[in-house]
Image: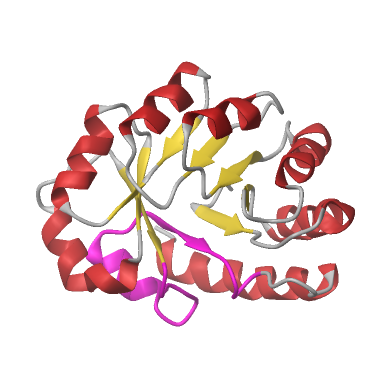
């Protein structure tokens, strides 16, 4: 079962990323991003791709320009996640054969992202839009487009975000924080997966 959970490993180091990735994948989370403001992120992404590329979708977060897209693409990564909607980044991502998940908060940003080829939308920060805002936005978005809520989303409110129209979520500090052991990440991931399945199953 592939879940629409993107694990955000902000601050992860190359020497720990494989152990953390293993814990996430074993728990059932197979979409993982390493934000580019992490220590040596390209090395971490390459390690993940080489080890888990056949069983998980792996890539970079906090991608802000085309040169970063190219650098990530050279690792063999699968996805690019951004905090903003930059048409050049989206187009470069698609030209490189990767999935594009740009950040958007307004209808204008959402439709601009889709116009330029985004595969899904990262509503960020989701707590600013709120569930009522997402519900209104979903009424005009194409039904097939996947919407990930990021920021203020967690196991205690998965059900509310699903009712508002979210297809999935991106999760950072509730899964991983710098200095956390891989086993602790695994425990967090298991709790998250249990809550996610209860809210999104069916």
Q: Nearer the viewer, residue 95 or 191?
A: 95
Apparent side of residue 162 relative to residue 57 in the rendered image (left or right)? left
Does the segment drawn in magenta span residue 156? yes
Q: For the view shown, which residue lies furthest in the right direction?
A: 15
Q: Position of residue 168 (x, y in %)?
A: 42, 56
Q: Position of residue 73 (x, y in %)?
A: 62, 26
Quadrant of res 76: top right
Apparent side of residue 143 relative to residue 149 in the rendered image (left or right)? left
Rendered residue at 45%/46% (across/down): 82
Q: Give the colouring mode of the picture.
A: secondary structure
Quadrant of res 85: top left
Does the segment drawn in magenta span residue 191? no
Rendered residue at 35%/60% (across/down): 124
Q: Position of residue 63 (x, y in %)?
A: 51, 43
Q: For the view shown, which residue lies furthest in the top direction?
A: 95
Apparent side of residue 59 relative to residue 11 in the rendered image (left or right)? left
Rendered residue at 46%/17% (across/down): 95
Q: Position of residue 87 (x, y in %)?
A: 31, 32
Rendered residue at 79%/41% (across/down): 43
Q: Which residues are magenta?
A: 151-175
Q: Quadrant of the C terminus?
A: bottom left
- Rendered view: 9 above or below 64: below
Total count of labels = 0
């Amino acid at each position: 079962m592939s879940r629409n959970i993107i694990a955000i490993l902000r601050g992860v180091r190359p020497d720990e990323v494989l152990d953390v990735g293993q814990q996430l994948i074993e728990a059932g989370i197979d979409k993982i991003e390493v934000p580019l403001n992490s220590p040596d992120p390209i090395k971490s992404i390459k390690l993940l791709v080489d080890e888990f590329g056949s069983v998980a979708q792996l890539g970079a977060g906090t991608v802000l320009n085309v040169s970063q897209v190219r650098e990530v693409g050279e690792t063999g990564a699968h996805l690019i996640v951004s905090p903003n909607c930059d048409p050049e980044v989206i187009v470069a991502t698609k030209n490189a054969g990767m999935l594009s998940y740009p950040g958007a908060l307004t209808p204008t940003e959402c439709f601009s992202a889709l116009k330029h080829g985004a595969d899904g939308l990262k509503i960020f920060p989701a707590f600013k839009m709120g569930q009522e805002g997402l519900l209104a936005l979903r009424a005009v978005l194409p039904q097939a487009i996947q919407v990930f809520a990021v920021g203020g989303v967690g196991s205690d409110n998965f059900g509310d975000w699903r009712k508002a129209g979210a297809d999935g979520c991106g999760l950072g500090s509730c899964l991983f924080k710098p200095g956390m052991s891989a086993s602790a990440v695994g425990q967090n991931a298991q709790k998250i997966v249990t809550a996610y399945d209860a809210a999104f199953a069916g």
